[in-house]
Amino acid sequence: MPRKKIDYNFTNECRKVFAHMKDSIAPLYPGRRVNGEHFLLAVAETRSSEAYKMLSELMLSENMDELWEWCVTRINTRLEPPLEMLAYSKMFDRCLGELSKDGKPISSGRFMCSVLKYDAEIAKELSILGVTINQMEHELENLYDVSSFKEDDKPQETSKDKQQQKRQQRPSKKTERQSYDTGELDKYLVNISKMASDGKVDEAVGNDSIIDSILTCLLKRDRNNALVVGDVGSGKTATVMHIANRINDGSVGKSFENKRLYKMDFMTLVSGTGFRGGFETKYEAIIEAAKKTGNCILFIDDIHSILGQNSKFSEISTDMMLDKILSEKRIPCICTTTYEGYSKNIMGNEVLSTRFEKIEMPKRNKNEILEIAIRVKEKYENFHSVTITRDFLSNTITMCERFLPNYGLN
């Protein structure tokens, strides 16, 4: 039995993208369902669309061509006979359903962000090309004020009311400058503080003493960069990210009020540039924006992965570039590494070793791990709709210690 057709509230530019996808892309690249790849191909050929403008701001033209080839290849590898009638995939229906709930018109930019949220393969490919969902959402805010849609229960505003509202909302030059600086950080980095305020950062149980040591280091006048060293799976990343939760709930003192924790991903910074100078331009923009805002804490995870001759960034003098940030007292940094990474790439590096204060993650025994697992098991029970017993956790930890020496709470 065919499904009832739903009339979605598309914007005009999004309607053009979907029409092009239906009339041109789907017949040329047929399949059993219209997927995210069909949508990307339609966006690439509809240059007036909102989604294309967002991608073109974040991606070089050669990367756009590479994305096109990837979409075509992925469609062709499915080798599915086409349906007689055009049908959306489950992912498509999910995106449209979610976007329809708030009553706002569905633009191609909003739909693009939703596709990245629900299609992991497309999100991964775009990340390789230097585009993340955080960057797309930031571009969406720049191109389109989603808050401008009026709800049905709001009274109708007169033109005089709108003009008065615009005058009240018009920021000063100082505010505009701060907004631009923060935008540069949100564009190139991952805003952990925003993730924490949205409830997307889990609590790091049992690591309060480590967090206190990190925060104490950040408050120092000199050498205010913390290097957290520990075994694989010891919870280094989760502990640092939990600092954003502590800052948001105000449990870390006045010195950290309004501070924001940003994560710097070198792979993302490099992959979207296409040439070395582009990376340096982004990097310098981040440093300048962080200095101007004055409330930024940078987080670099697994710093050893970008150092040394065997790293993916061996052609770039990453140690000297890192020193630009580490030597800047106005930009405190938190980095993580393993004991092996520390001994190979940092301990013998005269430039970097003097910039850090080393903070070691303690190795926990079975009883401590069990208590931590018991404190967080409720979240996993609710997420997976299962019941987890204490005996099950104890046996699991025993098996992990026996067969998986580098295990973590994943």
Image (cartoon, rainbow, N blue to C red):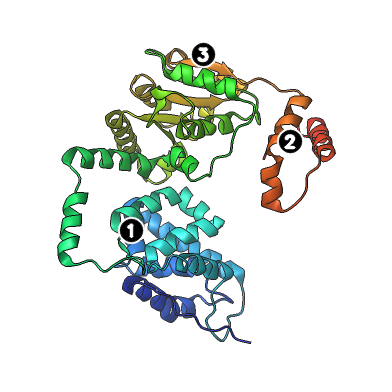
Q: CA distance from mark 2 to mark 1?
A: 41 Å
Q: Secondary structure at mark 3?
A: loop
Give residue 397's position: percent from left, percent from top.
Answer: 79, 34
- Separation of residues labelled 2 and 3 (CA atoms): 40 Å
- Marks 2 and 3 in Cβ contact (< 8 Å): no
Q: Give the mark nearest the N terminus, 2 or 1.
A: 1
Residue 89's place in the image compared with 206, above or below, is below
Q: Position of residue 69 (x, y in %)?
A: 46, 62
Task: Give the number of the mark in front: 2 or 3.
Answer: 2
Specify the amino acid type for callout 2. Answer: Ile
Rendering coords of residue 329 (x, y %) = 34, 19
Q: Which residue is mark 3?
A: 348
Report which quarter residue 394 is drawn in: top right
Task: Say which element carries label 2.
Answer: helix
Count of numbered circles in the view: 3
For badge 3, the amino acid type reads Gly
Please rate how many residues cluster around mark 1, counting C-alpha atoms within 10 Å: few if below 14, some from 14 to 19, many from 20.
Answer: few
The answer to which of 405 and 389 lies nearer the viewer is: 389
**Mark 1: which amino acid?**
Ser
Q: Which residue is mark 1?
A: 147
Up/down of 380 relative to 90, above or below: above
Picture quarter containing residue 254? top left
